[in-house]
Amino acid sequence: MSTIAKEDLNRVIITCAITGATHTPTMSEYLPVTPDAIIEQAIDAAKAGAAILHLHARDPNTHRPTPDLDIWLHILRSIRAETDAVLNMTTGGSTFMSIEDRLKAPSTASPELCSCNMGSMNFGTYAMIEKYRGKWKFDWEEDYLEASRNAIFRNTFSDIETILDVMGKGGTRFEFECYDVGHLYNLAHMLDRGLVQTPMFLQLIVGTLGGIGPGPENLMFMKETADRLFGAGTYQWSVLAGGRHQMNMATMAATMGGNVRVGLEDSLYAGRGKMATSNAEQVTMIRNIIEGLTKDVASPADARRMLGLKGSDKVGF
């Protein structure tokens, strides 16, 4: 039986992923790599129409991804003071963080929504090195990317169980990040065991080196697999596509009745050869597309209802 309300079928949730842990400072002068820049761009993205802000934290001095609790709380509290958008904390952190570090801030902050990566994988960012070699702003950047060649983004069954248990105790719901078809089967396994509740929020991810490739046929296969495993109407779904595939895959998702994710975590561009000057620019682009399809952009209140979230008054920050 469907758990998706009829009035929400034409609404599209825009998630904006503000900074991530993949792109490094050299790659774009517009990438927010300090806490204050993350805060500013997140608020602007919400004003542009993002109902959900997907967040990572960065160190104000090194500009590297960080699990530091004080930095996280500064970011969360500052954004919450200026917008009602849903704040979605990563539990992925970066490929090089332990599960303990990845959960340190989310377990304390108890957000309405957090990510949950549904399987271990190769996660290759080293291919970006050649484009920027010799131009690095920080000494750590090349080594950081190169390390992904021999690294595994660890998300074992035990890790997933830990995230579901630790975060679920505080009523946090999950954005299930699925980088390949097998990750959907891992999620079905957790659902069968009663560790996951519906309606679920699936983030179907295409185009990451180490996961399923980009393209309409792969997205269709992911969506059809989700329907077979879970049943249409038991979940909300969104699409994340990296780099030049971001807008066309998001448009396809919106056309198919899904939700969308944009942001500088996933792509640094706002069109062919044009650097995006902010996260808000990408949000505005996809909002115009959604409205051009005669669909409604979901508000934060809409997103909370559609995803069954606990409300911003029940967070720990």
Image: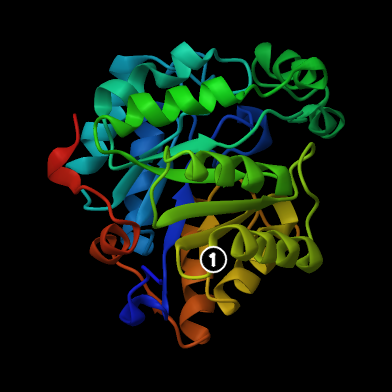
Taking the view exactly as shown, the residue that stands out farthest to the left is 313
Q: Amino acid at mark 1?
A: Gly
Picture residue at 60% right of the left edge, 65% below the top = 227
Residue 50 figure quarter: bottom left
Q: Quadrant of the C terminus?
A: top left
Q: Circle 1 sits on which residue?
A: 231
In the structure shown, which secondary structural element does the residue marked by tag 1 occupy? loop
Q: Indicate the position of residue 226 as horizontal and vertical percent values.
A: 62, 59
Taking the view exactly as shown, the residue that stands out farthest to the bottom is 294
Give the total number of marks visible in the rendering.
1
Q: Indicate the position of residue 126 as horizontal and vertical percent values.
A: 80, 27
Colour mapping: rainbow
**Residue 12 position (above or below residue 42):** below
Picture residue at 70% right of the left edge, 17% below the top = 144
7 sits left or right of 91 in the view: left
Taking the view exactly as shown, the residue that stands out farthest to the front is 193
Q: Nearer the viewer, residue 191 or 258?
A: 191
Question: Would residue 162 be visible to someone looking at this image?
Answer: yes
